[in-house]
Image: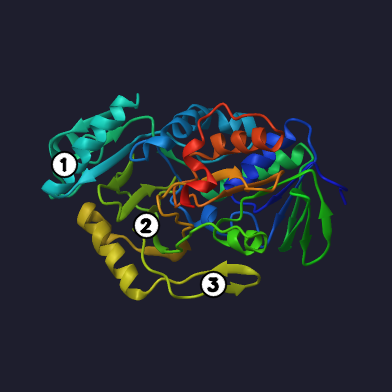
Amino acid sequence: MMASPDVIIVGAGISGCSAAYNLAALGLKVEIIEKHKPASMASGWTLAGVRQSGRENSEIPLAKFSVDIWPHLNEILGYKTGYTQKGNLRLARTEKEVQIITSLVKEQKKLGLDIEYLPSRNEIIKFVPNISENILAASFCKTDGHADPISTVNAYKMASENLNAQYNCDEEVKNIIVKNGTFKAVITDKRLISGGACILANGIHINSLIQQHGLSVPLQIPIVTVVQTEPTEISLTPVLGVANANLAMRKENNGRIRFTSGLNKWEGRIKYISNKPYVHPSIESFSNTIEIAASVLPDLKTCNIKNLWGGLIDLTPDSLPIIDQAPGIEGLLIASGFSGHGFGIAPAVGEILRDMAIGIKPKLPIDAFNYNRFQ
């Protein structure tokens, strides 16, 4: 057992594993505590889009930084992530959505994003020949793409383990020990672990650990429905999204198509099977998601379904994450509230958390992600 790690990370999703790799690459002792298994929650169920387009302005620098890294990530980590860079189409289905897309392209071009406006279906079918005739226009960002979520998290995990990071799964952090305004240790359901710093990258569970210290992140926890088809010959190269964000879709490298709903109210509970968490959307949600997807890509009606599942979102009021030191607690960092779009910016977030954990000012702008903006 590794004694007194330099940094303790709570949560083995993509943000936690990326931070672990970046810290371990500096030669630091890193220990990751995961309640279940790596990628058991948001990082595992996600569509795994790697996009810059359609993000809030403050996330664009992180997204552009990450997109420069993604094409080289297999080589950097030494393991495959399933990454492919074939673009992202954001579709307009109504005149109102045309206005949204037009404005999106105009604003994001100002930020230096390589994005273009496709004014008609004739332009769009060059990328997706079987797109619905109801599609009026789209934005296209050629440098966007997607990866495999489980493969990517495991790639970060194994690469960091090769650098002597230690993962402890099926272990739950119960309490954070703070003395004189400084982080000292975590107490798990098995032991006490002292450390120099601690990163809380535990998604929807963040408040269970910080409320005891008078802190709270204002989270809603909606559910997203995910559908995966059997392998299909349907041609789909870029990732598809829509202007009002109630659908996203991509073709996996194995030939299956994966698509997700928008955010829906969740009033259920997490169920555990062999200590793996599951959440179950309603039949109505699955039906609506399939209907919306087929209205964009009609050939989906002929596909067989392989899998159906749901995922929970740690949604903040402004849909931006909190990446900040916990107020009043030196050495305790919060990395939560990624609101369903943290996967693609994980390379940037890992470097930001590394720098914060060792007391260096991050080179990327993070002021928009401060904790106190909700106070």
Q: Is residue 359 left or right of residue 344?
A: right
Mark number displayed over residue 187: none
Q: Closer to the N terminus: mark 2 or mark 1?
A: 1
Q: Mark 3 to mark 2: distance in Å?
A: 19 Å
- Mark 2 nearby-residue class (10 Å; few <14, some 14–19, many ≥20): many
Q: Position of residue 192 (x, y in %)?
A: 83, 59
Give the amino acid at mark 1. Answer: Gln
Which residue in the protein does label 1 denote?
99
To which residue does mark 2 refer?
Answer: 260
Disc on the earlier residue, 3 or 2: 2
Q: Position of residue 151 (x, y in %)?
A: 57, 46
Kindly identify which numbered label has been placed on residue 270. 3
Residue 311, relative to residue 162: is it above or below? below
Q: Earlier in the sequence, mark 1 or mark 3?
A: 1
Q: Where in the figure is residue 89, as x and y percent of width and height?
A: 28, 40
The crowd level at tag 1 (other Cα within 10 Å; few <14, some 14-19, many 20+) is few
